[in-house]
Image (tube, rainbow, N blue to C red):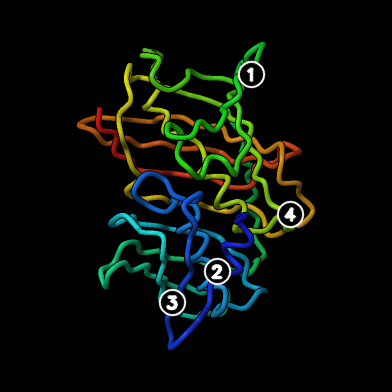
Amino acid sequence: MQFSQVLDSLALQNGVWSAAVPVDWMQGRSVFGGLQSALALRAMRALVPADFPLRALQTTFVAPVSGTVALSAQVLRTGKSVVHAEARITDGGQTAAIVIGVFGRARASQVEVIARPLDVNVLESPVEAPFIPGVSPSFVQHFKMRWLSGALPFTGSRVVPPRATFEVGIDDPAPANEAHVVAIADSIPPLALSMLTAFAPGSSVTWTLELLTERFDALALAGWRVHAELRAGRDGYTSQSAVVCGPGGRAIALSQQTMMVFG
């Protein structure tokens, strides 16, 4: 199933949203984190008017999520300009993820600062990131990705801080929307893996995605760039930030993740 098909399969019954996520959207033992957040966003969107654009999505990944996703959603507060909503993903009756959405109408302001990606030296021969069954996370097969700069995973790089730029596209026929931005932003691998010399597992703990624009339907779903930097890492926990740019180079979102890397 393609990304939009999985989202469209989300159904509400007796106050609980559910979707059966196929194995090709798994990330190890759990559903791909970007899809978890996108499903939660879809459930919240059923409660939040469309004229409130998504401004921020904050996800705490509590436990692995199996192929069947169950969600509940509620509006926490509706103000004149901002709506806060919450969605919880449960697995076996236990909370597996908590997602907070902040939706806000535009307001007049004198402040205007344009986010800019890091300056990078693009590789002479960008490296494709192929899907390798049994090696790559299953969800990767739905994305087209290549390294434009930065060290590859498990190459023992000692460049500090690790930085990389990825060109990313998602295979989906639907027009681009806020959920696609969520998926693209979370598709890149942890930069900490470039400092390792052998495979080691890892997972996201918390993730904040801030959206910088309100319209996405004119954007193609190929040719996005994610400029990422590992800001800090110690004791198995890392802090990774990224600027997500659309096909024309405009900054679309800012990402900040706390990750665990076991190696």
**Mark 4 and mark 3 in contact (Cβ < 8 Å)?**
no
Q: Which residue is mark 1?
A: 126
Give me the C-alpha separation between circle 1 and circle 3.
42 Å
Q: Which residue is mark 3?
A: 73
Nearest to N terminus: mark 1 or mark 3: 3
Front residue (pair 15, 233): 15
| Image quadrant where residue 134 sits | top left
Give me the C-alpha separation between circle 4 and circle 1.
26 Å
Residue 179 image position (x, y, % from top left): 59, 58
Q: Which residue is mark 2?
A: 42
Give me the C-alpha separation between circle 4 and circle 2.
18 Å
Q: Determine the residue positioned at 52% across, 25% down.
A: 164
Nearest to N terminus: mark 4 or mark 1: 1
Nearest to N terminus: mark 3 or mark 4: 3
Residue 190 image position (x, y, % from top left): 41, 33
Residue 236 image position (x, y, % from top left): 23, 33
Q: Is residue 215 above or below residue 121?
A: below
Please tell me the numbered disc located at residue 173.
Answer: 4
